[in-house]
Image (cartoon, rainbow, N blue to C red):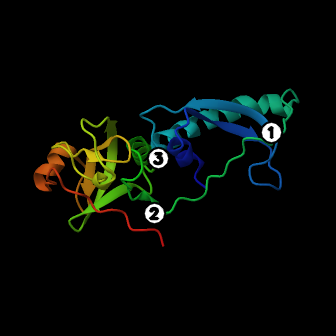
Amino acid sequence: AAPIQYSILSGDDKTGVTIMKMDEGLDTGPMISTAEIPITPETTSRSLFQEMTEVGADLLLRTLPGYLNGDLPPVAQPDEGVTLAPKIKKEEGRLDWNDDAAALERKVRAFDPAPGTYFEWNGARVKVLAAAVKEPQAAFGEGDRGRVVDEELGITCSQGVFYPLRLQKAGGKPLQTADFLRGFPVPVGTLLDDPPAAA
């Protein structure tokens, strides 16, 4: 399961940790205490995991005394609002320019550090380690999705323009976009490889 990744992918503005009693179901036991954690436009799965670890440890220490002396009786979880967060496959990290740019930017943050996001061009797999989104300066047709529109490596999507900010080729080190393009130029007008059709 990948609840941390899916909270970012879904565009949620908050998540949290829960101290609960175990039962026979999957995370269905009664709740003892909870703590909310905000998800910001800078939050990655890497940073969220670290924050949840710290918040969870602190919450557990604050919860145990009250639970053990009977002041915090467990409360049943509500039946509504239950969602699944299935395991993420490595191939899901490929960026699909038919998605909107904001969703791709969230994917970059959600899949950091694993499984990572990437696109392929000119025989090379290029990892995208950070990204931003801008509104297009001109109208683009459906056939232009995945096209590089400026010298900052802006890439058109179904909505918005996706801007990789930090990239890495296989065997190379992470580089800011300008430095990356000096060694691996991607000309304006390039139509990046479309993701393969689903089987």
Reading the image, the residue beneath label 2 is 90
Kindly identify which numbered label has been placed on residue 101. Answer: none
Comes first in the chain, label 3 or label 2: 2
Horizontal side, residue 175 vs residue 69: left or right: left
Q: How far apart are labels 3 and 2 at the CA level?
A: 13 Å
Q: Give residue 98's position: percent from left, percent from top.
A: 39, 53
Q: Is residue 45 above or below residue 172?
A: above
Kindly identify which numbered label has been placed on residue 78. Answer: 1
Q: Quadrant of the N terminus?
A: bottom right
User: Is label 1 in contact with label 2 (beta carbons under 8 Å)?
Assistant: no
Residue type highlighted by circle 3: Ala
Q: Counting other residues with Cα less than 10 Å from the Cα at mark 3, is it few (<14), some (14-19), or many (20 or more)?
A: many
Residue type highlighted by circle 2: Lys
Q: Secondary structure at mark 1?
A: loop
Q: Give residue 187's position: percent from left, percent from top.
A: 14, 53
Q: Counting other residues with Cα less than 10 Å from the Cα at mark 2, is it few (<14), some (14-19), or many (20 or more)?
A: few
Q: How far apart are labels 1 and 3 at the CA level?
A: 27 Å
Horizontal side, residue 91 vs residue 146: left or right: right
Q: Residue placed at 61% from the left, 57% from the top? A: 86
Furthest residue toward bottom: 199
Q: Give residue 71's position: percent from left, percent from top.
A: 86, 26
Reading the image, the residue beneath label 3 is 110
Q: Residue placed at 74% from the left, 31% from the top? A: 63
